[in-house]
Every structure is written in structure tokens, then in C-alpha cells.
Image (tube, rainbow, N blue to C red):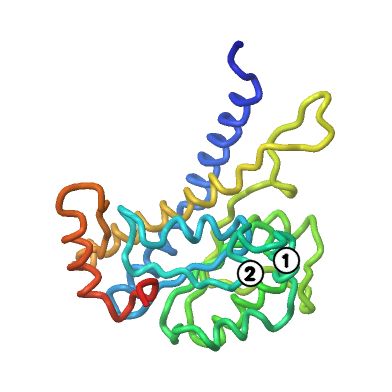
């Protein structure tokens, strides 16, 4: 069996998108990193939210080796992943008005905190209201979304607005509407989505920018080490003890 032509085409498409966001979003990535670093330095907290597959990028920066210990997942029951049954329920919950407000009201977020809201389309009620309500509470909101959806689709929120309209900083994933990079003769539907690859890269680039800014501010970035290297657990224990009042995934 020879090398897959389509597999190579997907890698090419993903690499092209990564280069595009690296160059096109550089200022916004730096700004997002600076906002996160300021929150860490000022004693505030960090949260990330995403629904469905967008939650994968939020989970990717929470409690992991090489990541900021202070990043917390703002979870909405039923929309975090495909473990809910039926899986279609998660998609339905994204369109429920008022759910975001209820989640924020029962969460530990406070004014001055940073919330990253990840939504590829940015058109559903849940991410739109999450950003709107968070800003009303005094949080800095960083949106990670494909801005193209705002011109090529209709908003599903009563306001007619999108996630990008309610953020202090917007990182544009530049993913085409439909999130499928490949087509092929004999295959009716487009396939091979790249949004997870690109969005996770945007998140990790932002965390790197935050670490860089923390060093500039004279603050040791509160990073976690791998528990699979010698001394990792001891290191992480010290970090979690020092910042325990801002880490919520242990409670």
C-alpha cells in the first residue's frame, strides 16, 4: 500500500492554517498572553470554556504538563464532550438561552478574572451569552473563533450578534465555514476538520506568550511539570499549594 495522498493533503492544509494564524493573529496572541499574565500577577484567576469539540482546546490547557497551573475549565454539564448521551444533546444545549448566565452565577468567577471562550462558529446562544455575561461581571474575555462565520452564517442568538462581538480580544482561527479541509471524487461530503489542531495551537501559543510576559513582569510562571518525570509530583505539589486558592479542578 502506497502513501495516502489525502493524508498528505490534510497535513499541508493544517500546516498552511497554522502559518496563517501565526502571522495573522500575532498581535492578538501577544495581547491575550499579556492579559493572562496580568491576571496571574494581580492575584486573579483564569478560566477556559468551550462546548462540543471546541471544549477540547479548553481542556488542552487545564492541568497538564507544561501548562499554567492556574488555568481552570469552566464546565457546562452536558456540553463538554461526546460522553453525554445522546451526543446530540450537547448541540441542543448550546442553543439554550439563559444557560450561560446560570453557569456563571454558580461559578467562582470574579471581576478581574480572565475567561477564554472557544467556539468555532461563535453563533450559538451559549458562547455568545457566556462572553456577554462575563464582561458584564467585569471579566476580561478572550474569544477564539472563526470570524468567517459572522459573515457567512446567521447568528442563533436573539441579539443577532456573535462571540466576536463580545470579546476584549479575538483570536481568529481562520477556519472555513463547515470545518472540513478536503474534498475528493467519490466522496459526497467534505471531510478532515482542522479546527482542533489550529485552536489548540492558538491556545498553547497564548500560554507561551503569557509565560514570556510573566518573566518580563518578574513573576515565575506557575507551570506544572509532568508527573512521569522524577520530581514532577513534588514540583506540582509546591505550585498547587502556593496557588491553591486559584485552582478549582482539585475541589
Q: Residue at x 73, y 57 (%)?
A: 149
Helix, strand or loop at mark 1: helix
Residue at the spot of label 1: 89
Numbered label attached to residue 78:
2
Q: Nearer the viewer, residue 206 or 195?
A: 195
Query: Rounded to the nearest whole Å, what is the CA distance between mark 1 and mark 2?
Result: 7 Å
Residue 163, placed above or below residue 107: above
What is the residue that sits farthest to the front in this orientation? Answer: 85
Q: Residue at x 54, y 44 (%)?
A: 197
Q: Nearer the viewer, residue 89 or 143?
A: 89
Residue 173, placed above or below residue 72: above
Q: CB under 8 Å between callouts 1 and 2?
A: yes
Helix, strand or loop at mark 2: loop
Q: Position of residue 244 (x, y in %)?
A: 27, 77
Q: Within the image, what quadrant is residue 151 found in?
A: bottom right
Q: Quadrant of the N terminus?
A: top right
What is the residue that sits farthest to the top in this orientation? Answer: 1
Q: Position of residue 227 (x, y in %)?
A: 25, 53
Q: Residue at x 48, y 76 (%)?
A: 140
Q: Nearer the viewer, residue 166 or 49?
A: 49
**Left or right: 240 as drawn, with respect to 45:** left
Q: Position of residue 40 (x, y in %)?
A: 31, 73
**Left or right: 125 as drawn, with respect to 29:** right
Sequence-first tag of 1 and 2: 2
**Left or right: 68 as drawn, with respect to 60:** left
Amino acid at each position: 500500500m502506497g502513501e495516502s495522498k489525502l493524508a498528505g493533503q490534510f497535513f499541508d492544509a493544517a500546516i498552511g492554517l497554522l502559518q496563517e494564524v501565526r502571522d495573522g493573529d500575532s498581535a492578538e496572541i501577544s495581547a491575550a498572553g499579556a492579559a493572562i499574565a496580568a491576571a496571574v500577577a494581580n492575584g486573579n484567576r483564569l478560566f477556559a470554556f468551550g462546548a462540543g469539540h471546541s471544549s477540547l482546546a479548553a481542556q488542552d490547557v487545564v492541568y497538564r504538563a507544561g501548562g499554567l497551573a492556574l488555568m481552570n475549565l469552566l464546565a457546562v454539564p452536558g456540553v463538554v464532550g461526546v460522553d453525554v448521551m445522546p451526543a446530540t444533546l450537547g448541540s441542543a444545549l448550546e442553543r439554550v438561552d439563559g444557560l450561560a448566565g446560570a453557569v456563571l452565577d454558580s461559578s467562582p468567577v470574579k471581576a478581574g478574572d480572565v475567561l477564554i471562550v472557544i467556539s468555532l462558529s461563535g453563533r450559538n446562544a451559549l458562547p455568545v451569552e457566556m462572553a456577554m455575561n462575563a464582561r458584564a461581571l467585569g471579566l476580561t474575555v478572550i474569544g477564539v473563533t472563526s470570524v468567517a462565520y459572522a459573515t457567512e452564517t446567521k447568528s442563533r442568538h436573539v441579539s443577532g450578534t456573535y462571540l466576536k462581538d463580545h470579546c476584549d480580544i479575538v483570536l481568529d482561527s481562520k477556519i472555513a465555514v463547515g470545518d472540513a479541509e478536503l474534498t475528493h471524487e467519490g466522496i459526497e461530503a467534505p471531510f478532515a476538520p482542522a479546527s482542533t489542531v489550529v485552536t489548540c495551537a492558538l491556545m498553547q501559543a497564548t500560554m507561551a506568550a503569557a509565560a514570556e510576559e510573566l518573566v518580563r513582569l518578574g513573576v515565575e510562571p506557575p507551570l506544572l511539570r509532568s508527573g512521569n518525570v522524577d520530581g514532577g509530583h513534588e514540583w506540582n505539589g509546591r505550585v498547587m499549594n502556593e496557588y491553591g486558592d486559584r485552582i478549582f479542578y482539585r475541589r
